[in-house]
Amino acid sequence: MIPERTQVAIVGGGPAGLMLAHLLRLRGVDSVVLEARPRERVETRQRAGILEHGTVDALREVGADARMDEHGLPHDGFELRFSGRSVRVDMQELTGHRVMIWAQTEVTKDLIALRLSHGEPLLFDAEVLAVEDVETDAPSVRYRHDGAEHVLRADAVVGADGSYGPARRAIPEHLVGRFERIYPYSWLGILADVAPSSHELIYARGREGFALASMRSPTVTRAYIQVPNGTDAQDWADEAIWDQLSARFALDDGSFTLARGPITDKSVTPMRSVVTEPMRHGRLFLAGDAAHIVPPTGAKGLNLAVADVRVLAEALGEWFASKDETLLDAYSDTALRRVWRASHFSWTMTTMLHVDPDGDPFDEKLALAHLHHIEVSESARRALAENYRGLALGAV
Ligand code: PHB
């Protein structure tokens, strides 16, 4: 039975909502998670796969680390390629931290299984119709499940329902600041049954655009190429994708060969940056994609969502324990400082590595000058590495 009342109503059962539920439970705070989509959809949606150190810590804290430790791939560094050459950014050496390759789909599966094993409320196919009364101390969520309408009352509501979710609409339009950048290109992503050609990720600026070599396991390659907006993935033949990947990763000394294999999944992702401010209105708190979107080039989306809920769990825990609102009042500003840092980093990585179809030779020269600076300056590499592996909570 789903309770009609809880301490925190969480709208959205993606990684942000689920992680929050777990962190709250550790602080003795009850929650109910309402997810609009079926479980199968939540568990299979392909997203990025790089976990910052802080995200790994959070998975450990809630006890969702066993499969990650068994199958995740810790990476000490990554490569940048441009003008036919390569620069390695050694995060471990430059910052003392590394990242973990562990797909968001796997993170989500583990968080769901853990929630269900605790017997804690998590409802799929629960479509939220409205978040109400957030300006009072008795907010509620109206939702439809199994053909009937229900109301969940709570002390606080968290909107972790993605960029198109309904929670944000509970904030009056005139109080919301929206900052947006649409990029003039998209990513065509593939999954392929072939061992990764490099044991680290490669971010390349090729003459015809960006390419990324990533992986899901020692036998599964994940890769992306920059394509024009509006591209249909089915218009790209497998061999044409491999040809573009090979060309964009090519090194002048001929030392790199890309292994090809059967492509099992193809999809196109548009690229945009969005930040909405503030992330709180009354008893409603926004977290993750519901409040901000970053282009995937910096691998920050999931990590930002987890950072939001770490800050929020601490603040809600303190509030329920002592009625002290100081941390809750600071939540939006605290979270937004990291969001803007990550937005700037993701924008920098994106513009430095993509070829702007509307750009001119000046843009090209600036991007190459930036890459060259990273190549020759250890402090430039360190700054890049710090942002990529993620700044500690409180360090932003
Ligand atoms: C991925 O493996 O899907 C991936 C990795 C790094 C990124 C984006 C996506 O920056």
Image (cartoon, rainbow, N blue to C red):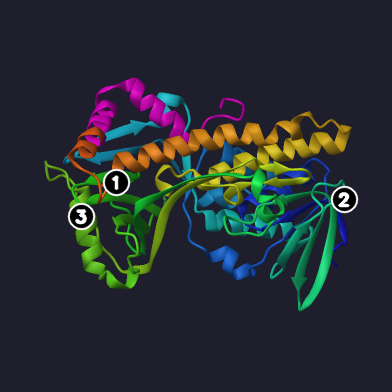
Work out which quarter of the rendered image holds the N terminus and state it: bottom right
The local secondary structure at tag 2 comes to loop
The reply to whether callout 3 and callout 2 are in contact (CB within 8 Å) is: no
Q: Nearer the viewer, mark 3 or mark 1?
A: 1
Whether residue 217 can be seen here:
no
Q: Could you tell whether 57 is left or right of 256 in the image?
A: right
Name of the residue lying farthest toward the left: 253
> Which stretch appears magenta?
367-396
Which amino acid does the dot numbered 2 rest on? Ala
Q: CA distance from mark 3 to mark 2?
A: 57 Å
The local secondary structure at tag 3 comes to helix
Of callouts 2 and 1, the N-terminal one: 2
Which amino acid does the dot numbered 3 rest on? Ser
Asked if residue 134 is positioned above or below residue 373 in the image, the reply reads below
Q: Quadrant of residue 14?
A: bottom right
Does 375 lie within the magenta span?
A: yes
The local secondary structure at tag 1 comes to loop
Of callouts 3 and 1, the N-terminal one: 3
As drawn, the label of residue 138 is 2
Residue 246 screen position, x and y as percent: 20, 55
Which amino acid does the dot numbered 1 rest on? His
Mark 2 close to ligand 1, CB under 8 Å: no
As drawn, the label of residue 354 is 1
Residue 222 screen position, x and y as percent: 37, 57
Q: CA distance from mark 3 to mark 1?
A: 16 Å
Q: Could you tell whether 326 is left or right of 41 in the image?
A: right
Residue 269 screen position, x and y as percent: 41, 59
